[in-house]
Structures are given as structure tokens and as C-alpha cells.
Image (spheres, helix red, strand yellow):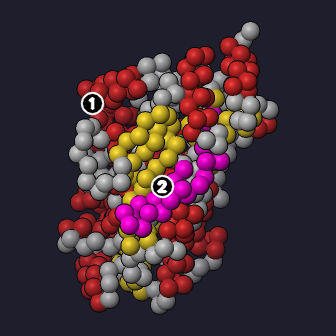
Amino acid sequence: MDAAVAFLGELRRRLPALRLLTDEIDRESYRRDETAHFEPGLPLAVALPARVDEVAEIMRLATEYRVPVVPRGAGTGLSGGSAGVEGALTVALTRMNRILEIDRANLVAVVQPGVINADLKAAVAKEGLFYPPDPASYEACSIGGNIGTNAGGLCCVKYGVTRDAVLSLEVVLADGHVIRTGGRNVKDAAGYSLTQLFVGSQGTLGIVTEATLRLRPTPPPKRTLLAFFPTVEAAGRAVAAMTAAGLEPCTLELMDSVTIAAVDEWHGLGLDRSAAALLLIESDRPGAAAEQELAAAESACEAAGATSVVGATNAMEADWLRQVRRLAFRAMERLGVARMEDIGAPRSRLPELLGAIERIAAAHEVRCGTFGHAGDGNLHPTFVWDRGDHEAEERAQAACEELYRAAIALGGTVTGEHGIGATRRAFLEEQRGAEAVGVMRSIKAALDPLGLLNPGRVV
Ligand SMILES: Cc1cc2nc3c(=O)[nH]c(=O)nc-3n(C[C@H](O)[C@H](O)[C@H](O)COP(=O)(O)OP(=O)(O)OC[C@H]3O[C@@H](n4cnc5c(N)ncnc54)[C@H](O)[C@@H]3O)c2cc1C
């Protein structure tokens, strides 16, 4: 009998309550994540476990039958990390979506991986608490996927990325063993930091089935500024100046003219389309400290050549401005096939990175809109082409490769938060060096000697 058929038969026999999708139409709906330009494979089947013991049994059987497994959250990833692998079992953790505990005494939440980021934020907010990581996709993406990618977002510039918020994990290993890493301790120096190792490993080292996350008290309400610039480099210089001055806004986001126009076209917001770039700057310091921080930010913007700086007049307007930034990718997607890149550089070199994006997009004659987390030095140049225009797609590919090299040459990275996944593997060694990638491969081999977990991703 075909090994795959035998595997699925045994899976049904050992786990009769497991939700297992085998119809082609269901499998098709798990073929892609949000990486529109990546061509994935068709999953052999899709398992939707409800409990850790089901995940463990799936991995024991996968090991026995040598069937590869793709862990999957909400499928919003932008590096092909949870896209299908031909003949592999996709294990979607979306049904494991309970918030198990909000421990006020220790400022932690214990959650299953399928919890949606926005739902966790809302639940802890009711207790006067705050879970900082906030990808622009926060209403759709899951905590498991955020851990898988070490997701960032709009307030990382002050509060750090997902890795900074994870204290402990329950992980099912490739052979079905279940381990716990970390605990509820804020300080913990016992042994290697396995928690941090699993965060960002994109499902290649284990399947996360529970996470203990660090919470903070709710910060004061935000004050918001919008600054418009005549060139993107000027906006970059303002960001570099704010960083050098030691300002710590909780949001420092950039949108260029192409992105401003795309969002404005969609929602008719009356944004200044003559500007080459805008910065969205927010402070959540208490009372007068926020005013002082924003006044210093305004001075930095003016010194860098800002043409106008305006403040949000009320909380609703500030929410709208944040929403404008969150809509950037969807607005670009309305123009054609959109490939969102994720390069980064040390913050002092942001003006050079912005210059490189403009130069490279022009040289390859590709349409590109840039937005992103400028305060982290992390930008999302997004290339757009008409569906079916393969020449434009190839030019975009060439532009991306040149961009990666430009970022590396600036001491930067080919991915700030979306991960190497399936789409950037060719550049991991160029950025990290052969020896460092060799160490990564040894870790992978130690934890997953048969190479069953998310093959073809990351290393
Ligand atoms: C409009 C839009 C805006 C976005 N904005 C941001 C942003 O601001 N910041 C940002 O960082 N990202 C952003 N993203 C990308 C994406 O939302 C994040 O990468 C997110 O973390 C993915 O979560 P997910 O639940 O969709 O995971 P998936 O896409 O399903 O999976 C992501 C990776 O994690 C692995 N994985 C999933 N669950 C588990 C698990 N339980 N155990 C082990 N591995 C697992 C998968 O194998 C895969 O490699 C955006 C995406 C879109 C479409």
C-alpha cells in the first residue's frame, strides 16, 4: 500500500476524533499563505488537532511513516512558511484557540497557539493589561504564527518583538515528545535558552502547543503626529535623528508617496499626495512627557526638511491614522500582484536604505511602494505587477535580490520580521555566513534528524 495512504489510515485509526481534511478542495484552501508570488505544493491532508496529545500522536506517526509536516497558524505569513509542501501533512493549530489563564499576579497570559493576536490584546485589556506585539495583521494572525516568525509590528520600536514577550513554551518535537521551556520567571538562567531558539524557527524545530506570554500594564493613551517630507531620504534622516537623540516613541512608521496614494485612492482620506513620504509618530508617555517627546520629534522632522507636521486632534483621528498605515499592504494589493519585502538596516543607515530602494526599483523598472517600521530600521518595499506579467515578475525578483545585497552591505538584514521561510533561503548564508548557518543546520539535525518539520524552509 502507498505509504501516504497507510499513514492517513493509521492516523484515522489512532485518532478517530481528529479533524482531518483529505478532499482536494479542502487541501487546496491550505495550499497558500499570503505570499502571493510563491508557488507552493498541495498538502497531502490537513489535520486540525484540538489537543496537545493529538499533535504528539501526529508527530509520532509522521516519524514512523516518514511523512513531512507543515505547522500552520492563520496562514497570513509573507515568506511561504506555512504554505503547502507537496505530499506533506499540514497541521493547522487554529482550533487550539483558548486563552488558558491571565495571571495578574505575575503579569503573564498562558495561551494556546491558535489564539488571534487581537483577541488576546482585547482579553488582557479588560484586566488593565497590555500584550505589546502588534503586527499590522493583528486582527487575523495567530500567536503560534507570531511565535513561528518572531513577529514584529508597529510598537516594537519601544516594546520589542514577539521574542521579547515569550517566557515559556510547550513544544511537540519531531518525534512526538513534548517539552516545556522556560516558566513564569522574569529572570531564569538555567541552561540554554530553548524558548528563544524556538521563537522565529518557523515550525522547523517543533510545534508550539502552548505559550506563556509576558504582559505589561496598559500604557497611557497615545498622542499622535503626522509629518510630511519632500523626499524619502529626508524622512529617513528624521528617523535617524530621533534615534540618535534617544527618543522612544511607541510608533515610528513610514509610508512613501506610492503607498500614500494607494491608501488615499481606496479610502479618500485627503492625505497630502504631493509629499514624497510621511512619518506616523506616536508617544504613550504619561502626561506632559508625551508632549515633550512629540515636540522633540517635531523638531527632528523640521530639521530634516519636513514640509508640514500635524497632530491628531482626538483619539478617533489618531486611530484612523494608525489604521491608514495598517491598510498599506492591502491598498498595494489592489494594484496587482503585491510582493512585500522586509529588509532592515541599522537605524543610522535608514536614509541609505531608502535611497537604495528607490535606485534599485528605478533601475529594474518595477513599481514599488515602501512603507514600514522605520523606527526599527525595518522597511517593506512592496513590488507590484499585473497578474500574468511574467517579465515584470522577473524584474521584481532581480530587484529583490539586489535589495537583499544592498541591505546586507549596510550591515542590515534580508528579513526583519517575516522570516527566511521558503522565499529567502538563498540569502541566509550570504547574510549570516557559512559557519553560522552550519551551526543552525546542526541544531536542526539534533532536533529533527529525519528533516520532517517544514522541509525546505529556513535552513
Ligand atoms: C496585511 C498584512 C500585514 C502584516 N503585517 C505584519 C507586521 O506588521 N509584522 C509582522 O511581523 N508580520 C506581518 N505580517 C505577516 C504575518 O501576519 C506574520 O508573519 C504572522 O506572525 C503570521 O502569523 P500566522 O498565524 O498567520 O502564521 P502562519 O502564516 O500560518 O505561519 C507562520 C510561520 O509560523 C509557523 N507556525 C505557525 N504556527 C506554529 C506553531 N504552532 N508552532 C510552530 N510553528 C508555527 C509556520 O510553519 C510558518 O513558518 C503581515 C501580513 C499581512 C497579510
Q: Which residue is mark 2?
A: 110
Looking at the image, which residue is at 58% across and 16% down?
64
Looking at the image, which residue is at 67% across and 40% down?
48
Label 2 CB-ligand 1 distance < 8 A: no
Furthest-front residue in view?
A: 105
Q: CA distance from mark 1 to mark 2?
A: 33 Å
Question: Which residues are the magenta region?
Answer: 90-112
Q: For mark 2, give the secondary structure.
A: strand
Q: Which residue is mark 1?
A: 436
For the N terminus, which image quadrant?
top right
Looking at the image, which residue is at 49% across and 68% down?
124
Q: Amino acid at mark 2?
A: Val
Report the front residue among 174 and 102: 102
| Residue 252 position in % (x across, y down) | 37, 69
Report the front residue among 52 and 420: 52
Between disc 1 and disc 2, the foreground one is 2
